[in-house]
Amino acid sequence: MFRFKQFTIQQHQTAMKVCTDACVLGAYTHPGTTHVQPAPTLLDIGTGTGLLALMAAQNYPTAHRIDAVELDPDAFGQATDNVAASPFANRVRVHQTAIQDFRPGYQYDLILSNPPFFTNHLRSPDAATNRALHTETLPFTDLVAAANRLLHPEGEWWVLLPPYEAGQLETLAQQANLWPFSRLSLRHNARKAPFRHITGYRRNPTSLHTDTLTVYESDPANPGRETYTRPFRQLLSPFYLIF
């Protein structure tokens, strides 16, 4: 269980647990960094526990159409329960389907996705873990096609991936006329290379804005230990109980 300031995520039935990089994606895509309307239509592709959909509901309190799509039946049930127990239950709908088959009849102003990205890694004996981590159920070609089909002409699509996979996705996205306009590189500390990229895409090519968020820094009060950086604290303070 992971408690946030406005909702709680139960995660005992899901393969993918709450993690720092997903929380950064949910916190970062708020009205100050996105350029969508104040009450956008929102889609979370592969919602898992429902985390990103609930963070989006908190970030956009006037958004009334928030859809979360999840293929795995156990994760779907977990996300449904988490949404029902949240203060945003009347604004978030969870759908059990593959995004390839999802046909809502409208397009979205803001799409969020923390997709599976392993391709040739060793498989887990747990099938749900494989679905969550490996691209077989959602290859990047299908993800790009879904985003291209479901994104409003003026909308934004934000994706969380490791740097190498982010480059692979970018090539496919540009072939579909989806162009990166913003990238946040996430790194553990100033000595480490980025381990995740959060990239925003639009339909029209433009210059790419880049930034870096460092999670930890040396703690001056405790030599040899690390503490969260001020920018990380500021970003996650609307959500994390510890800030």
Image: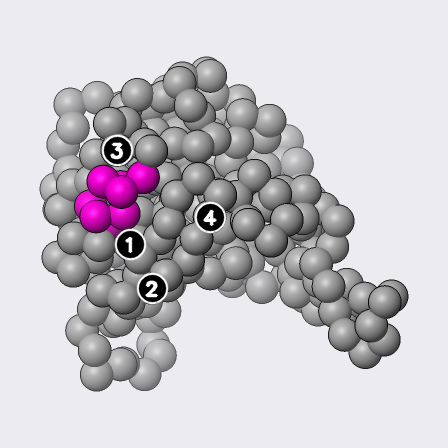
Relative to 2, residue 111 above or below:
above
The residues colored magenta run: 79-86
Name the foreground residue: 169 vs 88. Answer: 88
The three-letter amino acid code for the residue at tag 3 is Ala
The three-letter amino acid code for the residue at tag 4 is Phe
From the viewer's perspective, tell me whether residue 100 is left or right of residue 211: left
Distance between the Cα atoms at labels 4 and 3? 16 Å
**Residue at mark 2:** 16
**Residue at mark 4:** 4
Relative to 44, residue 203 above or below:
above
The three-letter amino acid code for the residue at tag 2 is Met
Nearest to the eye among marks 2 and 4: give it. 4
Distance between the Cα atoms at labels 1 and 4? 16 Å
Residue 152's quadrant in the figure? top left
Cβ atoms at labels 1 and 2 below 8 Å apart: yes
Residue 89: mark: 3
Distance between the Cα atoms at labels 3 and 2? 22 Å
The three-letter amino acid code for the residue at tag 1 is Gly
Relative to 129, residue 60 above or below:
above
Magenta highlight on residue 50: no
Label 4 CA crowd tier, 10 Å (few <14, some 14–19, many 20+): some
Label 2 CA crowd tier, 10 Å (few <14, some 14–19, many 20+): some
Residue 179 is situated, as x and y percent measured from the top left of the image, at 49, 35
Nearest to the eye among marks 3 and 1: give it. 3
Nearest to the eye among marks 3 and 2: give it. 3
